[in-house]
Image (spheres, rainbow, N blue to C red):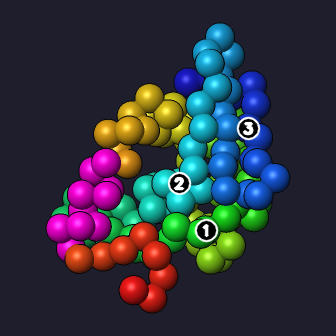
Amino acid sequence: MTAPSELRVSKDRRLLTVTFPGSEPFELPAEMLRVLSPSAEVQGHSPEQRVTVPGKRDVAITRIDPVGNYAVRITFDDFHDTGIFTWTYLAELGTEKDSRWQAYLDELAEKGLSRDRNR
């Protein structure tokens, strides 16, 4: 997959805009990136180990660092920084944003969890 032509973090650090060459830009909220992080901490080492991450409504992006020519590491203000977001994964999040977000919200509801901290 080709690298994005632009990655732009909003001034409030809560939105990442991703633009791939020849495509319209798409916006990914920091909260979505955090709770769907490709890290083993979130995804586990098998589907059964995947974790539903609550309480991240107000999370922000603090850093984005390149990883080779294929990905970026996103650091969040809750100090999570182990997810390597490949260009392919970012493109998937952009094209499947609505369905993935709804699945996350459904999981939270099913487990009695909240997007807010300490609830």
Q: Position of residue 113 (x, y in %)?
A: 30, 76
Q: Earlier in the sequence, mark 1 or mark 2?
A: 2
**Residue on which disc 3 sits:** 7
Where residue 93 is drawn, which disc sits there? none
Viewer-proximal residue among 95 and 109? 109
Horizontal arrangement in the rendering, residue 30 relative to residue 8 (left or right): left
Prevailing secondary structure of the magenta residues: helix
Rendered position, 106 above or below 24: below
Instruction: Locate residue 93, reporting x and y percent.
Output: 46, 39
Q: Amino acid at mark 1?
A: Val
Q: CA distance from mark 3 to mark 1?
A: 18 Å
Residue range highlighted in magenta: 102-111
Q: Which residue is mark 1?
A: 59
- Mark 1 against mark 2, which lies toward the viewer? 1
**Is 117 included in the stretch rendered in magenta?**
no
Q: Which residue is tagged 2?
A: 33
CA distance separating discs 1 and 2? 10 Å
Q: Residues within 10 Å of mark 3 (few under 14, many from 20)?
A: some
Between discs 3 and 2, the one toward the N terminus: 3
Q: What amino acid is at disc 3? A: Leu
Looking at the rendered structure, the secondary structure element under dot 1 is: loop
